[in-house]
Image (tube, rainbow, N blue to C red):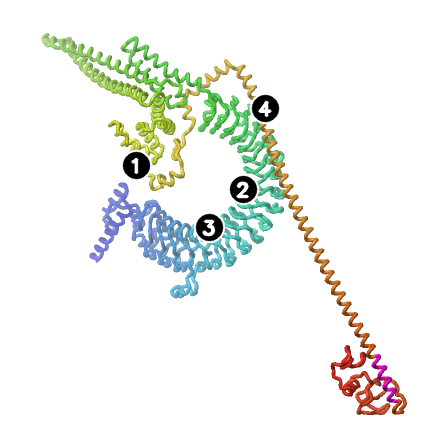
């Protein structure tokens, strides 16, 4: 037993060493703790240290210690919950599978490629989380958990096959297979092993009778999962982001389904069986190709319906029975009209109809009393919908980017619950004053219109926090705007503003201001009172630069002149003040090179030369002080030598100590002066080198171009590389072969993250044949930084050829982090307080003239604005008239076309009737003609028969006369002459007194037959209209 334990211990130690290599190292605290535990005599096994965090967690679970490390819970029987997530592990230690008491195991957010088959040992597992790994398949040994496993999460992996053996886990209630590579949900047919277990020939997802939630989203499914109708407890089904083209009819078997997500597929129709899913509450069918909705009358519990990004052309009667519907999203379709009875959806709260082709909204829509959010952006509405005033509970209204050029405020001022309204980009030519009655409004957006003036009643909207009026034609802000005390964002860029009212300074809560692209000629001085502002934009305004330029020159000239005066006086103690003044002038000069007024500054390096000379003078003074201290030191040494010859006394001892102490102080002071003199010499050398460099640049670059180079250096030093790049671009456009400018631009671009451009500049600069050693060292330093940046961005594809072709990197740079524009003003100009004082003084001096000029210009602008407004109105009216005329013309053409079609149809109908009548007349004429022929033939036959009868009677009379017999009564028996059978009058054989077989009257069947035999004629000689040539009216006839 001891040998076996040693072998097991050695095997475990080898496994643990492998685990340490895979899982990483442990921190010192855990190491010390576990070292102390390892020394315990009761330790169950030998463990090598240090341990990884995963090993620590497993150790804690196996030792079953209360209050262990985070991620593990245990009870008296053993550990039940083990959390090994987010450890960046590539493998799971096999010791995990020995903790057979686990019920919850979490190994998610790692890099695990596969799960060991030993997981089948954990027969008590109820929840297994293995998402966010690199799994390609699942072990079939999971079927060992069939009696306990209820939740399985393997999302965000690379699984392409789901073993059918896992269907035996019939206790599963939740399965998450999203974000994998599944092409179908497997269905096993004829598997004998599964047949023994489940007693069914076809084994599929239908075996999971307890399943309530199934997530198959973000896979590659091309067909709907089979046997899903057998999952009678299924309530949540997600098959979004797949390639499914058809929902089968057996989905009607999922009677308990409450949430269904079929978005981002290839469906062309919404399956008709949906009406049988009476318990569904959430349905997402967006991002498909559905052109029409099916009957939804059975979905009485549906509350959320998403049908965005389809091909619907109308919302009709299919939705009217959804009495519980509260959210309806139908954006990005082709809807042209809504059902006139849409008001039956009384539970509707949110309706989004953006990006459609609606020209009007039905009035019944606004009978929905609880409607809160209505968005109809990017449609073709030409007016505020009639009846909107009924929506008293509406909170958000968005009608942006339509054709509403005349806002009917009467439909809006009754919306007392409205919090936000968006009417941007509609072509409005005036601000509806009725909107000012909406005192509860917090956000108003009427940007991108043609509004020339704001009403004074705007200040009634005291609840506003955001006001966006950019890109209009506004010429003034109401004086009482400070009453909007809660406003935080004010956007008025791209207007015609020249000034802001003084009351704006009282809006202390404002944080974002944008006055860009207006007509400000002076920076508003009241901005200093707005202490909460974090963003202020005054760019693209014609700000006056004269006063600012004079003030900037004074900041340079005043300290420079003061320094010259001090140097001329030659006072040694004040020479440091001269140096400070020269340094201040040089600093201001360097700062202002990066400012907007740099073109008005003198192009001279005199400030640097002056500062350098002052520092040299100061160093000379320090040397003089050193010489004076040397003389004092020599004197003290001589006195100390003389004291050696004198008699010792208390006074002499004290004098010697004082001289020794002073001698030490002199040496310390000399050392300090020498060090300071060395620093001054280096400083003077740097300043003089800077002046010489400026002179050389002026000679090499030509007049004016050295200013751009110096300003670029100052901009780069002040962490403003985009301005430096612009100056260097201008310089290199004039002097393409100036390598120092290329090096400086490479450094600026590297600081912005424009590594490909910086690399090109380094390559061009390295071709120089006249670069100095320092310049080459500087270039190598910049190139190392650029190469490091290129290496870091190469995996992202930023420096690829395709990227550089698609994107143009401006001096600001696409990778440039955004800076606050207000910082430029603070760096370039004077203090805001000084600007405010100067602005007040200037206004006092020219108050009358400025006011008169302001009024004249304001009147002119008002007149121009009114003219422009009238022109806009006229243009809009013309456009509208033209549109209406085109519409009327189209309607007229449509009516004419329909009238012509109706006339042609009527003409064709009449022609068909005439042809039919003509044909009927022809048939009637033919029938009449045939009837006349038949009558004529009957008449002829009758006449012939009558003639024959008369002839027969005459022949009979002649026969009777010849035989001398008495004439027989008509209808009696008798035979025609020549017949074989003779009978007497009154003999038997008469049928009814009109003839008999033996002796029938001529015209009967027998008599005629005998006559034919006598005359030798056949059946073809019989009279027409009779049978066998009998007389009409006889029996055979």
Residue that mark 2 sits on: 354
Q: Disc 4 or 2, which lies upstream in sequence?
A: 2
How far apart in space, not on screen, are marks 2 and 1 (Cα)? 47 Å
Asked if the residue under mark 1 is in contact with the one under mark 2, i.e. CB atoms within 8 Å, the reply is: no
Please provide the residue range marked out in magenta: 946-960
Residue nearer the viewer, 189 or 908? 908
Residue closer to the observer: 696 or 940: 940
- Mark 2 vs mark 1: which is more N-terminal? 2
- Which residue is at the front of the view, 957 or 555? 957
- Identify the residue shown where x is 44% and y is 17%: 547
Residue annotated with mark 3: 240
Q: Is residue 423 left or right of residue 599?
A: right
Point out which mark residue 863 bears: 4
Determine the CA span between mark 3 and mark 1: 42 Å
Disc 3 crowd, CA 10 A, few/some/many (<14, 14-19, 20+): many
Residue 525 is marked as none
What is the spatial separation of the Cα atoms under label 4 and label 2, in whole angstroms?
38 Å
Disc 3 element? loop
Q: Residues within 10 Å of mark 1 (few under 14, many from 20)?
A: few
């Amino acid at each position: 037993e001891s040998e076996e334990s040693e072998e097991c211990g050695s095997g475990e130690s080898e496994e643990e060493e492998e685990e340490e290599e895979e899982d990483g190292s442990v921190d010192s605290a855990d190491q010390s703790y576990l070292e102390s535990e390892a020394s315990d005599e009761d330790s169950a096994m030998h463990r090598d240290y240090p341990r990884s965090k995963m090993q620590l967690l497993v150790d804690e679970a196996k030792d079953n210690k209360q209050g262990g490390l985070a991620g593990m819970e245990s009870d008296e029987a053993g550990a039940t919950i083990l959390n090994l997530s987010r450890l960046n592990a590539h493998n799971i230690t096999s010791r995990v599978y020995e903790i057979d008491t686990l019920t919850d195991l979490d190994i998610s957010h790692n890099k695990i490629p596969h799960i060991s088959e030993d997981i089948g040992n954990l027969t008590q597992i109820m929840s297994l989380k293995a998402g966010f790994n690199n799994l390609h398949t699942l072990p079939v040994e999971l079927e060992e958990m069939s009696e306990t496993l209820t939740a399985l999460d393997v999302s965000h992996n690379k699984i392409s096959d789901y073993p059918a053996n896992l269907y035996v886990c019939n206790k599963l209630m939740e399965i998450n297979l999203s974000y994998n590579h599944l092409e179908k949900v497997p269905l096993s047919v004829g598997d004998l092993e599964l047949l023994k277990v489940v007693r069914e020939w076809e084994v599929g997802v239908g075996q999971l009778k307890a399943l309530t939630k199934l997530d198959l989203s973000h896979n590659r499914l091309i067909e709907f999962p089979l046997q899903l109708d057998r999952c009678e407890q299924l309530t949540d089904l997600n098959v979004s982001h797949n390639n499914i083209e058809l929902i089968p009819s057996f989905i009607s078997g999922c009677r308990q389904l409450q949430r269904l997500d079929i978005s981002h597929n290839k469906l062309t129709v919404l399956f008709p069986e949906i009406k049988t899913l009476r318990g569904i509450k959430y349905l997402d069918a967006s991002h498909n190709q559905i052109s029409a909705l099916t009957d939804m009358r059975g979905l009485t519990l549906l509350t959320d319906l998403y049908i965005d990004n389809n091909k619907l052309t109308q919302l009709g009667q299919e939705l009217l029975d959804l009495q519980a519907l509260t959210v309806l999203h139908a954006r990005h379709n082709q809807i042209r009209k809504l059902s006139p009875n849409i008001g039956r959806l009384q539970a509707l709260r949110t309706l989004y109809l953006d990006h459609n082709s609606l020209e009007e909204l039905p009035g019944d829509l606004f009978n929905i009393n609880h409607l809160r959010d209505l968005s109809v952006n990017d449609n073709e509405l030409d007016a505020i919908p009639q009846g909107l005033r009924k929506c008293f509970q509406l909170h958000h209204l968005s009608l942006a980017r339509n054709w509403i050029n005349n806002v009917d405020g009467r439909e809006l001022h009754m919306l007392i619950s409205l919090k936000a309204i968006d009417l941007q980009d509609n072509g409005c030519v005036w601000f509806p004053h009725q909107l000012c009655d909406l005192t509860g409004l917090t956000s108003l957006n009427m940007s991108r219109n043609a509004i020339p003036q704001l009403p004074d009643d705007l200040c009634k909207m005291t609840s506003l926090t955001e006001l966006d009026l950019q890109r209009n034609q506004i010429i003034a802000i109401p004086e009482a705007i400070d009453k909007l005390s809660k406003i935080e964002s004010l956007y008025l860029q791209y207007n015609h503003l020249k000034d802001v009212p003084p009351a704006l300074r009282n809006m202390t809560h404002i944080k974002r201001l944008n006055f860009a692209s207006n007509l400000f000629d002076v920076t508003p001085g009241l901005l200093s009172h707005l202490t909460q502002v974090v963003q202020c934009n005054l760019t693209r305004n014609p700000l006056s630069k004269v006063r600012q330029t004079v003030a900037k020159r004074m900041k340079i000239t005043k300290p420079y002149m003061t320094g010259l005066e001090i140097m001329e006086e030659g006072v040694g103690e004040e020479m440091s003040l001269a140096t400070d003044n020269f340094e201040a002038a040089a600093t201001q000069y360097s700062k202002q090179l990066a400012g907007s007024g740099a073109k008005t500054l003198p192009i001279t390096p005199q400030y640097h030369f002056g500062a350098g000379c002052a520092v040299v003078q100061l160093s000379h003074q320090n040397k003089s002080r050193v010489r004076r201290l040397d003389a004092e030191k020599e004197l003290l040494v001589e006195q100390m030598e003389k004291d050696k010859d004198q008699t010792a006394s208390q006074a002499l001892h004290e004098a010697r100590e004082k001289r020794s102490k002073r001698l030490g102080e002199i040496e310390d002071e000399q050392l300090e002066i020498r060090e300071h003199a060395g620093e001054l010499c280096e400083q003077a050398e740097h300043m003089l080198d800077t002046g010489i460099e400026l002179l050389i640049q002026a000679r090499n670059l030509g007049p004016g171009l050295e200013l751009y180079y110096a300003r670029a250096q100052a901009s780069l030093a002040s962490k403003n590389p985009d301005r430096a790049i612009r100056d260097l671009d201008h310089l290199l456009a004039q002097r393409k072969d100036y390598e120092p400018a290329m090096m400086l631009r490479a450094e600026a671009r590297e600081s912005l993250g424009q590594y490909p451009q910086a690399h090109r500049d380094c390559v061009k600069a390295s071709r120089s044949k006249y670069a100095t050693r320092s310049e080459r060292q500087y270039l190598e330093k910049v190139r190392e930084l650029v190469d490091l940046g290129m290496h870091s961005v190469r995996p992202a594809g930023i420096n690829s050829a395709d990227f550089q072709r698609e994107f143009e990197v401006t001096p600001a740079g696409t990778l440039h982090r955004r800076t606050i524009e207000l910082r430029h003003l603070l760096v370039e100009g004077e203090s805001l307080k000084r600007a405010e004082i100067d602005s007040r003084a200037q206004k006092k001096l020219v108050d009358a003239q400025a006011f008169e000029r302001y009024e004249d210009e304001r009147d002119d602008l008002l007149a121009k604005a009114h003219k422009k407004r009238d022109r806009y109105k006229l243009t809009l009216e013309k456009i509208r008239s033209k549109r209406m005329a085109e519409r009327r013309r189209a309607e007229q053409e449509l009516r004419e076309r329909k009238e012509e079609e109706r006339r042609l149809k009527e003409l064709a109908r009449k022609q068909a009737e005439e042809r039919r009548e003509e044909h009927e007349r022809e048939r009637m004429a033919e029938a009449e003609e045939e009837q006349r022929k038949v009558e004529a033939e009957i008449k002829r036959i009758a006449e012939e028969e009558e003639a024959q009868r008369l002839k027969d009677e005459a022949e009979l009379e002649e026969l009777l006369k010849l035989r001398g017999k008495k004439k027989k009564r008509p209808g009696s028996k008798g035979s025609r002459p020549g017949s074989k059978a003779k009978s007497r009058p009154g003999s038997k054989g008469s049928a009814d007194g009109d003839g008999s077989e033996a002796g029938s009257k001529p015209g009967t069947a027998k008599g005629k037959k005998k006559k034919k035999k006598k005359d030798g004629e056949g059946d073809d000689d019989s009279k027409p209209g009779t049978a066998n040539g009998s007389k009409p009216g006889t029996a055979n006839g």
